[in-house]
Image (spheres, helix red, strand yellow):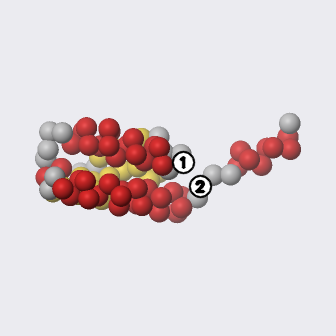
Amino acid sequence: MTRYKWKERLTVSSTEQMIQVQEVLDKLRPFIQGDGGDVELVDVEDGVVKVRLLGACGSCPASTITLKAGIERALMEEVEGIKEVEQVL
């Protein structure tokens, strides 16, 4: 049973995770920019990604949908360890 214990310690480093998050945001960026907005990565800590929505997205009533159904879903699917995405101002 203990011979597989090393697998529990294998996690993505915080630097690798930041790079992966940025890569996903870069893939999403053209769609966000198409609506006059943009997204900026602020921080990733303990599986929580903090982003700033810019341009039209910053004041759009649909920004919560963009954040949760778009950005958060994509990040949780593509980057190991992501639990949530939060908007910061």
Q: Which residue is mark 2?
A: 12
Could you tell me residue 61's position as x and y percent? Answer: 14, 39
Q: Amino acid at mark 2?
A: Val
- Lateral position of residue 6 relative to residue 60, left or right: right
Could you tell me residue 81's position as x and y percent? Answer: 53, 46
Gap between marks 2 and 1, in whole Å?
A: 7 Å
Could you tell me residue 46's position as x and y percent? Answer: 50, 47
Q: Amino acid at mark 1?
A: Glu
- Lateral position of residue 39 relative to residue 36, left or right: right
Q: Which residue is mark 1?
A: 80
Q: Are marks 2 and 1 in contact (CB under 8 Å)?
A: yes
53 and 65: which one is in front? 65
Q: Residue at 32%, 54% (x, y): give it.
A: 28
Report if residue 65 is visible in the image: yes
Q: Residue at 46%, 43% (x, y): give it.
A: 76
Secondary structure at numbered mark 1: loop
Identify whether 70 is placed above or below 22.
above
Q: How many marks?
A: 2
Q: Residue at 68%, 52% (x, y): give it.
A: 10
